[in-house]
Amino acid sequence: AQKITQTQPGMFVQEKEAVTLDCTYDTSDQSYGLFWYKQPSSGEMIFLIYQGSYDEQNATEGRYSLNFQKARKSANLVISASQLGDSAMYFCAMREGSTDSWGKLQFGAGTQVVVTP
Amino acid sequence: DSGVTQTPKHLITATGQRVTLRCSPRSGDLSVYWYQQSLDQGLQFLIQYYNGEERAKGNILERFSAQQFPDLHSELNLSSLELGDSALYFCASSPDRGYTGELFFGEGSRLTVL
C-alpha cells in the first residue's frame, strides 16, 4: 500500500503567487517525520522542510511552510511568493518511527511545479 | 553541496554488463542509503547500511548488491543489466541511529543501459 500519496502530478503557478502541494500519508506509528524535497531539472535532491509528528506548530523555513493536519494525515507544502527558480519536482517523504525502519525515507510520486512569469 | 559524493555522474553501458556505483557519505555519517529513481517507479528505496552492516532492504533486485566498507564508503553493484535498469541512482547518508532529521543526498549517478 502507498505510504505517501501526492495526488497532483503537475501544476502551473504564476510568479509571486502562493501554491499548495498536497501530501497525505499512512502510518500506524505514533512517532514519525515528514519531509519535503525539491528536485530541479539538474537532478539533485534538495531538502526543504521537516515536520515531526509531535511538533505542535507547523514548520516554516523561509518561503516554505508545512500545513500539518495530523488527524487527516496530511502534510501539505505551501510555497509563498513563487519564483521562477521554484520550478521543479517536489517530493513528500515520511520516516516512520518503528525501530525496524532504520531511518529510511519513503517518497511519494512527486508533483511537478512550473512557475510562469 | 550536501557533502555526499557519488561517482560516476553518468554511465552508459550495454545490456548484460555489470557496473559499480560508488558513494562517499558525509564526514561522520554512519548510515548510507541507496535509492533508484526511474520514470515508471519513482523514487524507490533499495538498501541501507549502518556502520558496515546491512540494516534495511527495500525493492532491490537479486541482480543488485551493495556493501559498506570500513571507511564507510559504499558501493552498489548492478549486474546482468537490463534496459529497465536505466535510472538515476542516489546515495544518501545520515548520522547515527537516533538521528531524526533529513537525509543528505548525493547528486546521483545516471545509468543508461543500451
Image: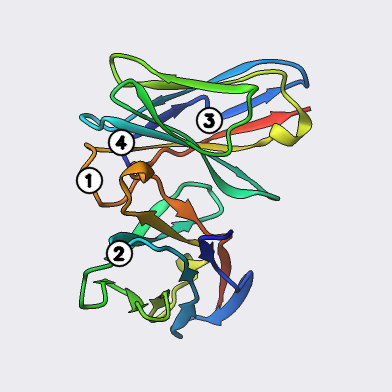
Identified by mark 1, the residue type is Tyr
Q: Residues within 10 Å of mark 1 (few under 14, many from 20)?
A: few
**Mark found first going from the N terminus, 3 or 4:** 4
**Mark found first going from the N terminus, 3 or 1:** 3
Q: Residues within 10 Å of mark 2 (few under 14, many from 20)?
A: few
- Residue beneath disc 2: A30
Q: Tell me, for residue B3, which label it has, or none.
A: 4
Classify A66 as above or below B92.
below
Mark pair 2, 3: CA separation: 39 Å
Mark pair 2, 1: CA separation: 17 Å
- Check chain identity for marks 3 and 1: say if they share one: yes
Left or right of B56 in this view: B99: left
Identified by mark 2, the residue type is Gln
**Mark found first going from the N terminus, 1 or 4:** 4
Q: Residues within 10 Å of mark 3 (few under 14, many from 20)?
A: some
- Residue beneath disc 1: B99
Using the image, name the chain to which the residue with label 3 belongs: B
- Residue beneath disc 3: B9
Along the line of sight, the residue nearer the viewer: A75 or B8:
A75
- Check chain identity for marks 2 and 3: say if they share one: no
Q: Position of residue B75 (x, y in %)?
A: 46, 20
Mark 3 or 1: in front is: 1
Mark 1 or 4: in front is: 1
Q: Position of residue B14 (x, y in %)?
A: 76, 20
- Check chain identity for marks 1 and 4: say if they share one: yes
Along the line of sight, the residue nearer the viewer: B14 or A53:
A53
